[in-house]
Structures are given as C-alpha cells and as structure tokens.
C-alpha cells in the first residue's frame, strides 16, 4: 500500500471529522455560509453547454495571477466557458469583484474522493490549469482517471514543501506525472519540480508580472488624497501579528522629526482590526479605523485600513511601503503590487515566498531590506526626508515590475498544444 493509498483511505474514513472541521471553519467565518455546499462538491449553478476550461488556485495571490490569463483565454477561446475555483472566502470576494462577466467562480471541493467526484461529474472540464502548489492527491487522481489534460502554471515549491516532499518522493512523483505541462514560477522552482519527478518542468517566468495594477475607486482616492493633504506618510502593508507593533514603534520614533506624520496600516487579515487598534492605543497613539467608517483627522497618528479589496487605493496614496509578513516567520507578501504604483519598497529578510523576486529587487535598487524596527525607522526617515531619493527608488521599482511583460505570451504559447487538443464534441463524449 502506497502513501497515496493511505491518504485516500484516511480521507474516506475521516468524513465525519472533515465535516466537523468545515463546520468549525464556517462558525469562524472562514467558509461562506451561503455557498457551503460547494465545499462538498455540490455545484451552485448548472454547467453551461460546450467546452469548459477550469482554472484553480488556492487563494488571493493565485487568483490575481489568473486574471490576465483569463482575459486572454476568453479572447482566444470565446466558445469556451471558464470556471475558476479557489478555497478561501477572501479569494471568492476578490473573484466576485474582478472576474470578467460570464466567468464562473466556485469553491474548490475539499479533497475527499466522493466530493471531488461529484464536482468533476458536474463540471466535466476539458482542460484544467492549476496555479502554484495545490497538489491535492484525490483531486489529481480523479482528474487523471477522467483523462482530463492538466497544466501547472507558476509552480512553486517552498522550502517547507521541498523538505516535506523529499520525505515522500514516490508520492509527489506520482502526482506530478498527471501534469502535461509543468512551469515553475522561478528557475529554482522549476529545478525543484524536476528533481521531484516532473522531468520536463520549465521556467516560463512569473505570471505575477503580468497582473494589472490593483484598482482603486476614483471617488475614494480623491477623498483620501484631500484628507491626507500634504502630511508625511508611509504604509505598512499586509501586516501580520507583531508587525503592527513594529509600525507603532517606528511611528513613535519618527513623529517628533516629521510633524503631522501619518502611519497607514493595512493588515493582511482584516478581522484583526479591532485588536490592532487596541494595541496601538496602548502605545498612546490616536487611531482612526476604516472599518468603523472613521476618517483620520489632523490629530490622528495612525489609520488602520481593515477593509477588503482596497489595497490598490492605499498603494496609490503611500509613496513608501513596507511589505508585511517579512519581519515575522511568514514568508512575505507580493512586492510587485506596490512597485507598480510609484512606491519606494522596503521589506524584511523573511521573503521566502518571493525569494528570487526579492533578491532581484534588492540587487537592482528596486527595494531595500530592513532587519528590525530600528532599521525600518531609519529607512522610512531617510525616504521621508529625501523626496528625490524616494522618487528614484519608486521609478526603479516600477521599471522592475514592468520588466517581464512577455511572460503571458510565453505561457499561452506553452498552453497552445493543450488548448488545441480539445475536440469540438469533447463534453458530449465524456458526459
């Protein structure tokens, strides 16, 4: 009996525990109550007739990477329906806002054989395109059994995954064998995927470079631009627990030097907003909180923007951005998003999720690494005091973000043989 056989047996026998886990997640707000049945493979809408291309990614980052590809696929294959699946509530909200009209979103079923089978029996995809690192064994096995071509794009093997899969070489090799195309996000990812069993894995570039700038509502941008006026400011973006305290230390240190300083904090998880505000007030700081519909007045020192889908707004207002998740053990967040919107970029040493990108940005002068609260304060102070350096750094970041404009063309060229293999009556034959 193989490791994958054991996994399948556990997911079958563990049905009651998996259901209880999902109910717990639902109670915590981590599952969509209205669409909860989708996690059991129960579709919430009929399958349209004709061809169907299925794209899947875990959460927000993968969803953003999909968007440019979706637009091009719709232009290339107007006869095909596009189905997008993700696994988180936040990604579903993003998809609702950003997907083109006519593209369907569903929650991916939890990886239990009968739920996976129910999902595939309903949607009957002609081609599956998965993003980054979603190697769910039961889902991959079911796709393979139905002879559905599947591609892996922006494949990523984190340090943790690399160590874990090296302990189960036969299992990961069997899973990777299901993919007709494997494209690593970086050269290192491609090499790791080859060593794990995807012999033909290649590096086509990172699809994150193809994403459009994050949007912002014009009215809100104009309103906040007027509210902030000419106050010196900086942004701690996508922060994780512990980093808001660092931001508070930076503000306290710099406020005497920069009168009117406004520190903007956008937490990665908006549900932490109230706790963050309490912590900031314990530092003696005056705080405005966006989720409570309060705007910062001249006396407020920190603005906590604990709302969803507004990162593009605050990147346009900041000028100086610290990337969260990089001064705590998380792996960092995407530095390309603020780089597209005229910001000088700072991040900590913990950028493992974007290691190659962070190294290249640092080497090119597109970003600066800070080690702790003290060095972050020094860097923010220097950029606040020197608008010319800030503008030069922002321009370098923007050039870097625009530096791989052809990645989408390379990906589509690699996908072309799989798209061409979809026969006109494929769905009727498989139904």
Image (cartoon, helix red, strand yellow):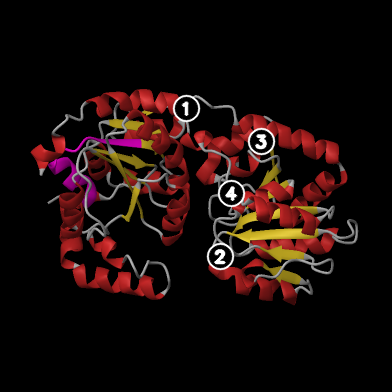
Mark 2 residue element: helix
Which of the two marks, 2 or 4, is nearer to us in this view?
2
Are there few (<14), some (14-19), or many (20+) residues within 10 Å of tag 1?
A: some
Of pointers 4 and 1, the one earlier in the residue sequence: 4
Which residue occupies the foreground of this view, 179 or 8? 179
Q: How far separated are the C-alphas under marks 4 and 3? A: 13 Å
Residue under the image location 60 percent in, 64 percent down: 306
What residue does disc 1 label? Answer: 407
Left or right: where does residue 428 sit relative to residue 354? left
Residue under the image location 79 percent in, 55 percent down: 226
What residue does disc 3 label? Answer: 362
Which of the two marks, 4 or 1, is nearer to us in this view?
1
What residue does disc 4 label? Answer: 350
Mark 3 residue element: helix
Mark 1 residue element: helix
Left or right: where does residue 18 sit relative to residue 353? left
Residue under the image location 67 percent in, 54 percent down: 219
Residue under the image location 19 percent in, 62 percent down: 10
Residue interval drawn in magenta: 138-152
Of pointers 4 and 3, the one earlier in the residue sequence: 4
Which of the two marks, 1 or 3, is nearer to us in this view?
1
Which residue occupies the foreground of this view, 175 or 140? 140
Q: Can you give x and y, in whole percent of width and height, for residue 377 in the image? A: 78, 53
Left or right: where does residue 26 sit relative to residue 10? right
What residue does disc 2 label? Answer: 270
**Number of residue marks:** 4
Q: How far separated are the C-alphas under marks 4 and 1? A: 26 Å
Quick check: is 149 in the magenta stretch? yes
Quick check: is 185 in the magenta stretch? no
Q: How far separated are the C-alphas under marks 1 and 3? A: 21 Å
């Amino acid at each position: 009996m193989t490791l994958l056989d054991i996994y399948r047996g556990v997911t079958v026998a563990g049905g009651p525990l998996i259901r209880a886990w999902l109910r717990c997640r639902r109670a915590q707000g981590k599952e969509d109550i209205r669409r909860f049945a989708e996690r059991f493979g129960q579709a919430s809408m009929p399958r349209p007739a004709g061809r169907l291309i299925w794209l899947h990614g875990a959460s927000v980052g993968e969803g953003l990477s999909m968007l440019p590809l979706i637009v091009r696929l719709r232009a290339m294959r107007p006869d095909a329906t596009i189905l997008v699946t993700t696994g988180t509530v936040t990604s579903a909200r993003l998809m609702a806002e950003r997907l083109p009209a006519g593209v369907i979103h569903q929650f991916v079923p939890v990886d239990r054989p009968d739920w996976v089978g129910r999902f595939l029996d309903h949607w009957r995809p002609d081609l599956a395109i998965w993003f980054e690192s979603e190697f769910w064994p039961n889902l991959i096995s079911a796709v393979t059994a139905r002879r559905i071509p599947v591609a892996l794009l922006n494949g990523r093997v984190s340090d943790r995954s690399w160590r874990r899969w090296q302990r189960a070489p036969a299992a990961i090799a069997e899973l990777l064998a299901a993919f007709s195309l494997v494209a690593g996000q970086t050269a290192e990812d491609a090499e790791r995927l080859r060593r794990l069993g995807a012999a033909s894995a290649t590096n086509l570039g990172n699809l994150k470079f193809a994403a459009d700038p994050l949007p912002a509502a014009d009215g809100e941008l104009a309103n906040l631009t007027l509210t902030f006026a000419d106050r010196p400011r900086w942004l701690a973006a996508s922060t994780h627990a512990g980093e808001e305290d660092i931001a508070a230390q930076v503000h306290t240190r710099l406020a005497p030097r920069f009168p009117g300083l406004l520190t903007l904090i956008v937490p990665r998880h908006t549900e932490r907003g109230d706790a963050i505000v309490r912590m900031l007030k314990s530092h003696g700081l005056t705080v405005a909180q966006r989720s409570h519909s309060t705007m910062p007045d001249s006396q407020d020192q920190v603005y906590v923007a604990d709302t969803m889908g507004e990162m593009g707004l605050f990147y346009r207002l900041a000028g100086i951005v610290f990337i969260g998740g990089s001064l705590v053990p998380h792996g960092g967040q995407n530095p390309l998003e603020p780089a597209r919107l005229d910001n000088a970029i700072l991040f900590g040493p913990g950028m493992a999720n974007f290691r190659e990108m962070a190294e290249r940005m640092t080497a090119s002068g597109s970003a600066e690494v800070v080690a702790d609260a003290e060095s972050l304060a020094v860097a923010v102070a220097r950029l606040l005091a020197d608008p010319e350096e800030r503008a030069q750094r922002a321009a370098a970041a923007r050039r870097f973000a625009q530096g791989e404009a052809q990645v989408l063309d390379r990906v589509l060229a690699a996908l072309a043989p799989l798209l061409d293999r979809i026969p006109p009556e494929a769905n009727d034959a498989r139904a």
